[in-house]
């Protein structure tokens, strides 16, 4: 078996799969069951002054039969007294000394508040701290969570205060509700963060009930924006991880979070620079035992790739992620339709004719049967036909010979500047 | 005319000038596309082409890069 263990800024865990701070890590009972099932670490449900929650907390998008394609919550941080959580953290750590337990923290942006909570949670033996600068609802109205996570100076200052008191590694969890996450990531690094994690949830309103005109979810006829997560947010999270990973000023390890549902998603985040991953919605949807497939799948993948340790693949795709201006304008692909597999549903023809470049012809063969054919010279290689095609293997995007050497937009503009 | 045919027409105009000894001298790009000014290597004559298609705008840029590279 490949070595799946990770060391994220000094926090060690037997595998890269941690439960994210959320309902699955609400109590010692749950975290211990998760560790028994195989999870490598857990970020405890955010600790702070115990809050009050409303009833009706979650909502989900089902899309074309896929349940929980996106998930939304208006739940706040832990509603249990700190002492109760600390006792359970202590007991859990004692039973599972080799698993990572990270305490997620959120207090008001005051130095003494951070010092107090850091000291109390470190006394029970946590492996690290995660600062929750990300929850977008409720707590943000009180100046915490994403409200402070959106202000780079507050991220830096609070991280600095925590580092003044902390003996264990400090992870700063960032909000995606910001235009450029690298700005707050840099602020965290400047404040002394040992690692960053992303993403927390995205501001969302799940829907409006057409009969009652209530929001979804609603609390006695009133709604408030929630935080969106689950499979739908994965591309947003992956981009944010990648943007941080390729930024030379963000030189700390990354814990990747957001829509990770299986081992393949986890590998994508790791290739894009995450040292490990955190998961919430997939565990809430399917239970702790999804970890079995994740570990097995990851192990097989590494074996197949001839890689003996997971850490070898961290960030391998980062050099392949760049700015648009560095992409080759002379690289071309074109669609090819395999008529043996095509079922002639015409979806590609309609998509291309109505909304792309009108390059898929409907023709009739000598046998009187209709078939679809791409006019390669007019195909811009947009992928739309392959995306809408319902049959695997019916449309392939094939590289066509480039008639000119590689030329990026940046190359082109530099050349044009010489011809003014 | 299909965009591809438009491209071939514009490419042919560019190739004609290059074959006849012209080099790209300057390019002005605006909302209407690119206005590419050519100067003859030896005789110094100037010619201008209005290039509209995206592929032909890539094409003359590649030629300009090759020209700059030697
Ligand atoms: C119901 C719910 C409660 C959450 N509570 C917290 C929390 O207390 N602290 C925190 O940092 N993140 C919290 N999160 C965010 C998750 O930790 C995670 O960042 C987010 O759900 C994205 O991961 P996912 O797509 O795997 O769910 C919560 C998420 C959900 C769904």
Image: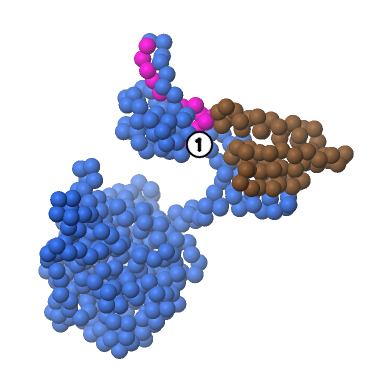
Chain colours: A blue, B brown
Would you place residue A50 above or below residue B14 in this image?
Answer: below
Q: Is residue A171 visible?
A: no
Within 10 Å of the Cα at label 1, are there few (<14), some (14-19), or many (20+) other Cα atoms?
some
Magenta region, residue range = A368-381
Q: Quadrant of residue A243?
A: bottom left
Say which element carries label 1. Answer: loop
Callout 1: chain: A
Task: Give A14 or B44, whichever is nearer the viewer.
Answer: B44
Write the residue at 63% across / 30% down: B8
| Residue under pointer 1 | A380
Pick the residue in front: A97 or B2: B2
Q: Where does the image place residue B5, in percent across and percent down from the top left?
A: 59, 28
Q: Position of residue A230 (x, y in %)?
A: 26, 56
Within the magenta stretch, is there residue A338?
no
The image shows residue A102 at horizontal and vertical percentages of: 26, 73
The residue at the far bottom in this view is: A112
Q: Position of B59 compared to A218: left or right?
A: right
């Amino acid at each position: 078996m490949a070595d799946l263990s990770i060391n994220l800024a000094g926090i060690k865990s037997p595998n890269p799969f941690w439960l994210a701070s959320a309902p699955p890590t609400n109590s010692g009972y749950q975290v211990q069951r998760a560790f028994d099932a195989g999870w490598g670490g857990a970020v405890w449900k955010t600790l702070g002054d115990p809050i009050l929650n409303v009833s009706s907390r979650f909502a989900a998008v089902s899309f074309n039969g896929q349940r929980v394609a996106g998930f939304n919550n208006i739940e706040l941080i832990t509603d249990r007294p700190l002492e109760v959580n600390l006792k359970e953290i202590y007991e859990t750590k004692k039973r599972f000394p080799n698993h990572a337990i990270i305490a997620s923290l959120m207090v008001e942006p005051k130095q003494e508040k951070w010092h107090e909570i850091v000291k109390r949670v470190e006394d029970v033996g946590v492996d690290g701290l995660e600062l929750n600068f990300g929850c977008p609802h409720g707590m943000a109205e009180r100046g915490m969570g994403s409200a402070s996570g959106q202000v780079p100076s507050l991220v830096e200052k609070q991280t600095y205060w925590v580092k003044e008191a902390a003996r264990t590694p400090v992870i700063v969890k960032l909000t995606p509700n910001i235009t450029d996450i690298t700005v707050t990531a840099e602020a965290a690094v400047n404040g002394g963060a040992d690692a960053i994690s992303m993403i927390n949830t995205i501001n969302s309103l799940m829907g409006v009930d057409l009969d009652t005109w209530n929001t979804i979810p609603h609390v006695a006829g009133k709604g408030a924006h929630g935080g969106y997560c689950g499979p739908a947010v994965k591309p947003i999270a992956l981009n944010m991880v990648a943007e941080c990973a390729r930024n030379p000023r963000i030189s700390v390890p990354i814990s990747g979070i957001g829509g990770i549902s299986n081992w393949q998603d986890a590998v994508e985040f790791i290739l894009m620079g995450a040292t490990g991953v955190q998961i919430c919605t997939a565990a809430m949807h399917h239970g702790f035992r999804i970890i079995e497939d994740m570990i097995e799948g990851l192990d097989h993948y590494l074996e197949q790739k001839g890689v003996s340790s997971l850490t070898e693949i961290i960030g391998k795709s980062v050099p392949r992620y760049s700015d648009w201006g560095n992409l080759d304008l002379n690289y071309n692909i074109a669609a090819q339709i395999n008529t043996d597999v095509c079922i002639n549903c015409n979806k590609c023809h309609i998509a291309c004719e109505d909304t792309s470049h009108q390059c898929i012809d409907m023709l009739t063969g000598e046998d009187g049967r209709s078939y679809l054919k791409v006019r390669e010279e007019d195909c811009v290689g947009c992928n739309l036909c392959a995306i809408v095609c319902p049959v695997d293997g019916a449309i392939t995007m094939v590289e066509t010979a480039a008639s000119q050497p590689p030329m990026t937009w940046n190359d082109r503009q530099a050349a044009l500047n010489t011809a003014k | 005319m299909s965009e591809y045919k438009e491209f071939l027409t514009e490419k042919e105009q560019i190739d004609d000038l290059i074959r006849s000894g012209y080099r790209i001298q300057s390019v002005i790009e605006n909302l209407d596309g690119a206005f590419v000014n050519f100067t003859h290597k030896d005789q110094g004559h100037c010619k201008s082409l209005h290039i509209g298609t995206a592929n032909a705008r890539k094409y003359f840029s590649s030629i300009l890069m090759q020209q700059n590279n030697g």
